[in-house]
Image: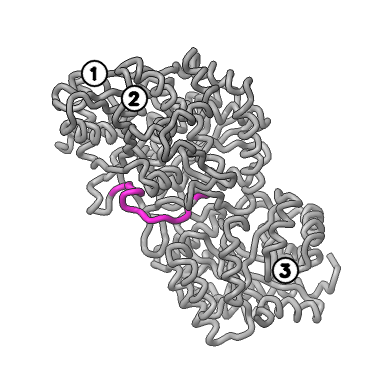
């Protein structure tokens, strides 16, 4: 298998001394066409990788903002097959921006794991995050995802032990998603020193890029995170823009991310 | 004391078994019951589950812990619960003899307290001053609030907004006991959403909080741990039945929502191959109508709430809303050990509709002078159906898992509608 789109994205950024901007959007909120418009606006604003959320009825690891987005999408009847259709349409117009599907295990199992991997890879997805598949329950799944040319991205948390980090590092590819706070998406505020300490622990075990999510809400927090991490992952804050004015979703998300991107790029390396 | 001895001889019990299930020792180290169970949670909860599994593994063998649990069972819960021969009902049916395991006589009125006592004792030993729980009908919430009061712990109970409306009396009981009841407004605003919210709370307050799950579901070690605490029910039966009828029963019957009262009475009997185990799910308006809660009878395997098991779900893998007249059975999943027992053929799973459960409820009130919980009434309905056609020397043991005082409003409402 050649170098994955996620890998080449990080390689290119490294050469240019820049960090990755990874925004998240729940597919189908408020509707499928808006999601595609939001994704295109993300690209224009400078997103390097897009995490596309698969709606699920029981999003155990999400806070109220992303829960609401999922509920709106489900009311529109958007399921995994529709999300994969969005991937296909996005990829037909864009060959450069990496796309990661993020969701929970059950919709994937309902479709069938092999079939999901086959269809996702053919549609043009580059990575998969299954929030409730920890490494020990996904050895075969990880191998099948890799064999199809995609990355299986794992989460690490402040509570992850050294042994756990080593275990995840052995299986992870693409990037590692470091959840900067105990809790659910959309919670609390960032403690930069704490994040720095944990990133050092993770990097002792792996050379693959580490993105930080949970608690990034504006250019300033994204800039601080990127002074120590390889990527800033932004989710709930984007959903809030969509929620505030669904008819102007793409415009508002584009405006917000343009500001974040500018803040990330104007600092230069290592500044904080 | 026989009960205490039964607790200590837990492992020994497994040796008096028949060939096929004699060496039953599931789950494995990562909580798998064959293809079911396991740990399917976000990384934020992994450390908490490891910590819990370690603590439980240590204290389950600790003589001091076991002695304290026996003492609490005897003096706070009121164990052992008796076995009662439902003579009049058996006579009217004209078939097998029906016996009740009287879990309805426990403190707080159901089997739920067996488990909350055990988990709260563990929480104290782990130094967690705050406990949280999910609840549907409110029975587990009341049992959790009760032990939190008993041990001086802060307690937050998550309950769906819809259930809070339907179960006002239990909400008040929890508040009397000092717990705060947190209304869950997400999803379908019922038990499954309360469980999601409790998991989110736990992920956020993992350092000082212990999550007391009310049934044999959730990520490992919960299905095993809750089963172990509830197994006191079956261990008592194994001692009581020979004294009462000279042998073990031919059938053991229990209702199944998440499945904790059923696992509690089934587990010690798994090795006794001559004893048939039957779980009874809630068929609601009838399985063909789609308005039911019969996950094992009508669901497909999938992943929810941290484990792999049978689930009621649509084609897209979204969990669907369930229906049962008994809020305690109104859950779209089921404990993974039941999924395994079903596939292995060691237990069979039947169902009873709302109407059948109500009929059994009324019959039990009038013929036996016992007001059963609507949950338990599902087991009674199937037991009556079965006993009718069996010879008179057969013995059917039903787990009467709770009393029906909490169900007065529901039953009265149905009576007004002419049901």
- Circle 2 packing at 10 Å, graded few (<14), some (14-19), many (20+), is many
The residue that label 1 is drawn on is B369
Q: What are the residue bounds of the magenta stretch?
A: B292-307
Helix, strand or loop at mark 2: loop
Q: Residue at x 50, y 35 (%)?
A: B226
The quarter of the picture where the C terminus of chain B appears is top left
Chain label for disc 2 = B
Q: Residue at x 33, y 21 (%)?
A: B247
Residue A213 position (above or below residue B240): below
The residue positioned farthest toward the front in the image shown: B19
The residue that label 3 is drawn on is A231
Q: Residue at x 58, y 85 (%)?
A: A94
Residue A203 position (above or below residue A49): above
Earlier in the chain: of badge 1 and badge 2, it is 2
Mark 1 or mark 2, whichever is nearer to me: 2
Circles 3 and 1 on the same chain: no
Give me the C-alpha separation between circle 3 and circle 2.
64 Å
Helix, strand or loop at mark 3: strand
The answer to which image quadrant residue A82 occupies is bottom left
- Where does the image place residue A62, in percent across and percent down from the top left? 56, 55
- Where does the image place residue A11, in percent across and percent down from the top left? 76, 78
- Where does the image place residue B34, in percent across and percent down from the top left? 48, 49
Chain label for disc 3 = A
The answer to which image quadrant residue B148 occupies is top right
Give me the C-alpha separation between circle 1 and circle 2.
25 Å
- Circle 3 packing at 10 Å, graded few (<14), some (14-19), many (20+), is many
The residue that label 2 is drawn on is B248
Please indicate, yes or no, whether residue B178 appears anywhere in the rendered image: no
């Amino acid at each position: 298998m050649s170098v994955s789109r996620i890998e080449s994205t990080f390689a290119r950024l490294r050469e240019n001394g820049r960090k990755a901007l990874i925004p998240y959007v729940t597919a189908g909120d408020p509707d499928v066409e808006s999601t595609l418009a939001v994704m295109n606006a993300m690209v224009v604003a400078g997103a390097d990788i897009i995490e596309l959320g698969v709606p699920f009825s029981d999003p155990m690891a999400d806070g109220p903002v992303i829960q609401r987005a999922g509920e709106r999408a489900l009311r529109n009847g958007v399921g995994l097959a529709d999300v994969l259709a969005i991937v296909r349409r996005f990829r037909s117009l864009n060959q450069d921006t990496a796309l990661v599907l993020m969701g929970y295990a059950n919709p994937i199992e309902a479709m069938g794991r092999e079939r999901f991997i086959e269809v996702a890879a053919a549609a043009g997805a580059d990575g998969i995050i299954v929030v409730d598949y920890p490494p020990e329950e996904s050895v075969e799944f990880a191998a099948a995802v890799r064999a199809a040319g995609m990355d299986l991205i794992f989460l690490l948390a402040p509570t992850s032990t050294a042994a756990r980090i080593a275990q995840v590092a052995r299986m992870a590819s693409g990037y590692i998603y470091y959840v900067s706070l105990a809790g659910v998406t959309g919670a609390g505020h960032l403690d930069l020193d704490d994040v720095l300490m944990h990133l050092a622990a993770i990097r002792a075990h792996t050379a693959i890029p580490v993105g930080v999510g949970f608690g990034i809400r504006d250019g300033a927090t994204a800039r601080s995170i990127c002074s120590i991490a390889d990527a800033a992952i932004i989710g709930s804050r984007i959903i809030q823009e969509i929620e505030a004015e669904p008819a102007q979703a793409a415009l508002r998300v584009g405006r917000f991310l343009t500001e974040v991107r500018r803040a990330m790029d104007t600092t230069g390396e290592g500044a904080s | 004391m026989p009960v205490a001895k039964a607790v200590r001889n837990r492992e020994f019990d497994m040796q008096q078994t028949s060939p096929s299930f004699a060496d039953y020792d599931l789950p494995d180290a990562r909580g798998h019951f064959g293809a079911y169970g396991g740990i399917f949670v976000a990384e934020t909860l992994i450390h908490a589950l490891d910590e819990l599994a370690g603590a439980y593994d240590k204290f389950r063998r600790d003589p001091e812990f076991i002695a304290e649990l026996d003492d609490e069972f005897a003096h706070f819960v009121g164990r052992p619960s008796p076995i009662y021969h439902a003579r009049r009902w058996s006579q009217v049916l004209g078939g097998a003899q029906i016996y009740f395991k009287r879990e309805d006589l426990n403190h707080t009125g159901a089997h739920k307290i067996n488990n909350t006592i055990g988990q709260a004792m563990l929480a104290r030993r782990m130094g967690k001053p705050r406990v949280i729980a999910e609840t549907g009908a409110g029975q587990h919430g009341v049992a959790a609030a009760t032990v939190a009061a008993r041990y001086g712990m802060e307690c937050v109970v998550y309950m769906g907004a819809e259930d809070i409306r339907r179960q006002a009396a239990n909400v008040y009981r929890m508040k009397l006991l000092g717990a705060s009841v947190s209304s869950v407004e997400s999803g379908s605003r019922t038990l499954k959403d309360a469980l999601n919210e409790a998991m989110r709370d736990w992920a956020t307050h993992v350092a000082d909080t212990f999550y007391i799950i009310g049934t044999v579901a959730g990520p490992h070690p919960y299905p095993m741990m809750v089963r172990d605490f509830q197994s006191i029910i079956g261990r008592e039966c194994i001692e009581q039945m020979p004294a009462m009828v000279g042998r073990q029963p031919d059938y053991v019957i229990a209702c199944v929502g998440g499945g904790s009262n059923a696992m509690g009475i089934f587990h010690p009997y798994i090795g006794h191959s001559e004893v048939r185990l039957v779980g009874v799910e809630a068929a609601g308006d009838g399985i063909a109508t789609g308005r039911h809660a019969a996950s094992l009878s009508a669901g497909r395997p999938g992943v929810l709430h941290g484990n792999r098991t049978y689930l009621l779900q649509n084609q897209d893998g979204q969990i669907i809303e369930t229906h049962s007249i008994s809020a305690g059975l109104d859950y779209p999943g089921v404990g993974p050990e039941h999924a395994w027992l079903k596939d292995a053929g060691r237990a069979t799973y039947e169902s009873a509709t709302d109407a059948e459960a109500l009929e059994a409820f009324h019959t039990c009130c009038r013929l036996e002078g016992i007001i059963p919980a609507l949950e338990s009434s599902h087991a009674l309905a199937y037991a009556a159906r079965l006993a009718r056609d069996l010879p008179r020397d057969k013995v059917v043991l039903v787990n009467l898992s709770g009393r029906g005082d909490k169900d007065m409003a529901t039953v009265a409402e149905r009576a007004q509608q002419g049901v």
